Amino acid sequence: MFDMKKIPMARTVSVALLAVFAGGCENFLDVNTDPNAPVNARVDVRLPAVVTGMVHTVYYGDPGQWTVEWMQQTSYNRDSRGYDELQLYEVQDNSANGAWSYHYATMLNELKLMMEEVDPDADAAYYGLAKFLSAWVWLHTTDLWGPVPFTEALDPAVPTPAYDDQLPTIYGQALAMMDEAVASMRQTSRRTPGANDLLFNGDMSRWAKLARTVQARHQLRLAYAPGENAQERAQAAISALGEGLTSTADDVVFEYPGGAGARNPLWRYVDRNLLFTASGLTVEMLMERNDPRLPIMVEPAVKDMEGGQVVYRGHYNADEPAADSTISEVGHFFTAEDAPLNVASYADAKFTEAEARLILSGPGAADAPYREGIRAIMEKWGVDAADIDAYVDARPMLASLPNPLEEIIREKWIANYLTIEPWNDWRRTGFPSIEPVPNAFLPAIPVRIRTPESELASNSENVTASGVDPGLQGMLFSGPSVWWGGSPPAGLTGGN
């Protein structure tokens, strides 16, 4: 059915670096930290650390896995304080503190130091990498919290930084930073990364492709935001994709060797002690279309296998716990301690293109990239060619569907399995349709992460001025200054 050997691999992560970043986020609690305080390390030492941190803790850290649960891609099959409350939409203060401090005091501060330690012209490669990663972390930060400290953040002379709006301030400046970063990556540089570049071994052309693909994703994220022009943002996404990933050979993955301190972070959420299982929604969506990705994404229930049967049985979110042997695990293809993590994929880029072309020209123009996205992710995961053809051929033309956007996002939801991207797409489109779990702490699925207690203690006046409820109810914030405050037109078909 599939072959794991078909997956492209990136460079191996340093066990020591993983150990540093696994424990680093609890050491800082304030947004503004003296930039001279961290150990003075050379930029070529900082680079592998920040790349590791970006993948391991920012993109796939706690907030990412909370949202996977809220999107019902996984389900919590235990009855205990903590994780059980998480699937009922409660985020504990200490968890929010850790995520906030890691973004600011660790990642953004380290990247600021990197840019200060190099000559922007002579060391253009390092400067471009630091600027791109900084822009990406800023976008990720505002995507999680909405209004956040930005213009005054990271300045030790301003201990209580003001909050900036997401639109137009943070997004506008971060997207411009990405343009500047790509320009730097393309300059001649006296020093370029080598083995310390854990993704591309110093290939700056691949970094530029990654930057443009990430930029396209965030341009499209603004398409339905209040006050934004959907067609202009869609065209900006298409333009960026023209310099982005061009095939599955360009896919960006991060390899983990496994073992203590060097495990895939999904292992501790999903595979260890079976805290999270395959969800009922995931199994249901795959089975209703006879999707050949089912045995890759979901493990058969152990009890049925012992009886000689292959049965996929998901656990519906917030249902009563069931015996582990009766519930399917999340596919080990993704959760093994040495499984690689997806950083960016050609499949995701094609779904971004499909939606952008839907906006610009209608479903006819979106159909080809939509189908190419399905093929790309199936090929990446090792699905047999005949099964790929059968599945793609069975999909109706987008123009024949009442809501082609829903279909594009449905397939994208599968392609970005176990990442934060399905939550990002759901917040702006409402697809796929997901019912809130019953008896939750909130009446609806959260659209932001709660404000950390540490920020309330040290910067309360500016938190209040931001207009966001810092408590649990603030996780439902959908104000006009955030991209998830809008929504696509009902039954979007694109074009004029």
Image: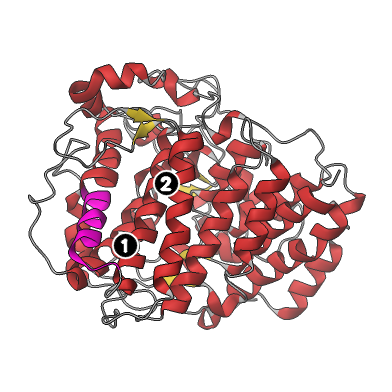
Q: Residue at x 42, y 55 (%)?
A: 177
Compared with 280, 10 (above or below) is below
Mark carried by residue 57? none
Q: CA distance from mark 2 to mark 1?
A: 15 Å
| Number of on-image labels | 2
The colour scheme is secondary structure
- Provide the residue span drawn in magenta: 106-120
Q: Quadrant of residue 483?
A: top right
49 vs 197: above or below:
above
Residue 170: percent from left, percent from top: 43, 40
Seen in the image, is 259 located left or right of residue 350? Answer: left
- Above or below, 459 against 250 in this view is above
Question: Which numbered disc flags the more N-terminal residue, 2 or 1?
Answer: 1
Q: Secondary structure at mark 2?
A: helix
Look at discs 2 and 1 and give the one toward the viewer. Answer: 1
- 34 or 427: nearer the viewer: 34
Extreme-right residue of the structure: 400
Query: Is 294 situated left or right of 493 in this image?
Result: left
Amino acid type at mark 1: Ala
Which residue shows up at 38% across the image and 21% down it?
Answer: 466
Residue 31, horizontal then vertical, whole percent: 22, 37
Q: Can residue 309 be seen here?
A: no
* Quadrant into which the N terminus falls: bottom right
User: Which residue is denoted by mark 1 in the rendering?
Assistant: 130
